[in-house]
Image (cartoon, rainbow, N blue to C red):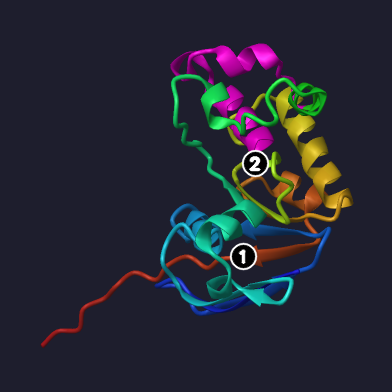
Amino acid sequence: MLRVETLKLAPLPPLSFEVADGECLAVEGASGTGKTRLLRAIADLDPVEGLIFLDGAERGEIPAPAWREKVRYVAAEPGWWSDTPRGSFDPAVLGTAKLERQLANVGMTLEHLDRDIALLSTGERLRLAFVRALQRAPKVLLLDEPTASLDGASAALVEEQIRFQLHAGRTVLIATHDLGFSQRLSHTRLVLPKPRPVTLDAA
């Protein structure tokens, strides 16, 4: 179970919630409300005040690299550390039947691992990053607009694989503007309020 207590992401009020194993929380709200910042904070990619627990262990009790293996964040525009996707995958999984199957499940092949990142579409990069996030069997998946750059067929494949991860007992948080997608997958919703405009009082 993932539990968040009094997480402070200004200008939002302190956030507290929990998501059980095998459940999906949809984080919704207009652009600029803090959906991405929330996912990045939970992934320990940005500093934040508050407590985050995974299966009873608080984030500060777990070394950052170990936390990020258990709690995997997939950005809307994923980062890469080499000219081709292959260099960003664990060498231990390359060439395995499991990886080939995971790629096929989202409409990709092993050949995509050797294509220049710059020549891959945004949707292809996003699907490869989704598969990359699964490689070390994380407990939690944090997905930022996982289908926003995909055509209908590709989005359906990714949606089915997210559903499979839930059946496998993983906790999933999705930041999305797609209410239909949210309704089909989520067990609970967290709707972030619009930031209030700053007003200055006359002296």
The x and y percentages for residue 179 are 69, 49
Please state which amino acid type lies under the numbered disc 1: Val
Please state which amino acid type lies under the numbered disc 2: Ala
Left or right, 128 with respect to 50, comes to right
Task: Name the residue: 83% across, 51% down.
Answer: 166
Above or below 133: residue 152: above
Task: Name the residue: 41% across, 66% down.
Answer: 47
The x and y percentages for residue 195 are 42, 67
Above or below 131: residue 21: below
Q: Which residues are magenta?
A: 106-132
The x and y percentages for residue 148 are 60, 36
Label disc, if present, on residue 191 of the rendered structure: 1
Above or below 196: residue 31: above
From the image, which quarter does the N terminus lie in?
bottom right
Quick check: can you spot residue 147? no
From the image, which quarter does the C terminus lie in?
bottom left
Of labels 2 and 1, earlier in sequence is: 2
Residue carrying label 2: 133
